[in-house]
Image (cartoon, grey):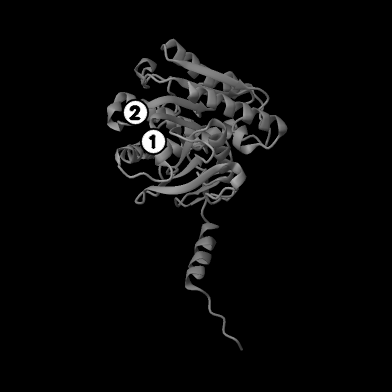
Amino acid sequence: MVAISLDSSLSLQIDKDCHRRGVGITEEIDGLIKVYKDGHVERPQIVPCVTSALPPEHGVTSRDIVIDKFTDIWARFYVPTTCHGKLPLIVYFHGGGFCVGSAAWSCYHEFLARLAAKAGCLVMSVNYRLAPENPLPAAFDDGIKALMWLKQQALSSASDWWSRQCNFSNIFVAGDSAGANVAYNIIARLSSEEAAAIKPLDLKGLILIQPFFGGELLTNSEKYLIQSSRSALSLATSDTYWRLALPFGANREHPWCNPLGKGSMKMEDLMELPVMVCISEMDILKDRNLELVAALAKARKEVEHVIHKGVGHGFQVLSKSQVSQTRTLEMMSQIQAFISG
C-alpha cells in the first residue's frame, strides 16, 4: 500500500476552514467580502489582480514601487511613452468602500493606463490598507505617507524612469468612490495642518470621481433612485462599508463620512485648490455629490462638476456597455482639460 503524506500547512488550512464553518458571519457583501465573528476576513477574487505589464500599443510604461514595506503600501506608476518633457502627475486612490479593491485590480490597471495616455500625464496609483482590519483613518494616513514619499523623490538628486518626466510642481490628487473620499480627506488634513510640509510638491487640483460620502439623513437619490441587482453601490452596500470602515461607535455623521456635518471642517478652511467633481446620473450618491459641489461653491472655492448621463456608480471601471465606454472617454477628456488648466 502506498502511504500518502499530507502537507502539514494544508492540514492546518483544512482545520481552519472546518472551524470557520461553525463561525458566524457578522458582515457580508455578496461576492466581495465576508467578515466572521472571530475577526477573519475573506475577499473573493471577484476582480482579477494583474501585474504591471502593458501591451506596447497602450503607449504607457507601468511598474510597481514599494512606498512602505512595513505597512505594505505600494504604488503602480503609469508613464506615457509618447509624451516628452515634464508631465503633470495624478496621485490616484482606488475605490471599494475602504474595504475592497486594489491598485492591481485589472479594471483600474486598464482605466489608469488609458487615462495616462489620453491626458498626457503620469499616474501614481496608491495601494492603501483596507478596513475592517485597518479602519479609518488608516487609508488617510497611507495617503499622506504616499505624498511624503513623493516629496522625498522630488528632493532626491536621483533620476529614474518615472521621476525624470515628473513635474513635481504640477500635482493633482484624485480618486473614485472611497478613493475620492481619501483624496478629499488628505487635502482636508493638509489644510488643517501645514501644507508646507509637502514642499517642494505643488498641489494644483483635486479630482473627485463619484465621491463616497454619507450621512444619517438620506438624500432623495439614496432613498428613491432604484438600483439594479448589478449596481456597484446600493444603500445596503453603502451602510455595510461604513460600519466596517468607521471607528467603533461612530455613525454616518462622522466628519470622515459626512464633510457637511456639524463636526466637520468648515469648507472655507479647505486648501485653496481647484476642484473637479464627476457625478453619475444613475448613482445613489448623485444628490450627495451635488450638495458637496454647492457647499464648495458657497465657500467660494473654485469648483466645477460634470454629470455623466445614463450611467451609475463606478461605470468607468466596472461597466463595458457602449454608453459607459462613451462616458469614460468623455471623463478622460474632461480630466485632461482640468489638469491642463
Q: Position of residue 142 (x, y in %)?
A: 38, 40
Give the camera-side residue of 120 and 38. Answer: 120
Mark 1 is surrounded, within 10 Å at the Cα level, by few (under 14), some (14 to 19) or many (20 or more) other residues, namely many
Q: How far across and how far down the image is residue 325, in percent?
A: 67, 33
| Disc on res. 189 | 2
Residue 179: which numbered mark, if any?
none
Q: How busy is the neighbourhood of tag 2: few (under 14 within 10 Å), some, or many (20 plus)?
A: some
The picture places residue 178, in percent across and down from the top left corner, at 49, 34
Disc 1 marks a residue whose amino acid type is Phe
Q: Which residue is labeled 1 in the image?
A: 140
Q: Is 304 located above or below residue 41 in the figure?
A: above
Using the image, determine if residue 265 lies above or below residue 197: above
Percent position (x, y) of residue 114?
Answer: 58, 37
Disc 1, disc 2: CB below 8 Å?
yes
The reply, left or right, for residue 282 in relation to residue 12 is right
Q: Is residue 198 left or right of residue 50?
A: left
**SS of the residue at dot 2?**
helix
Q: Name the residue type under label 2.
A: Arg
Q: Is residue 79 left or right of residue 198?
A: right
Look at 40% across and 44% down and name the residue there.
134
Q: Quadrant of residue 247?
A: top left
Outermost residue toward the right in this view:
322
Give the residue at x 50% y 46%: 62
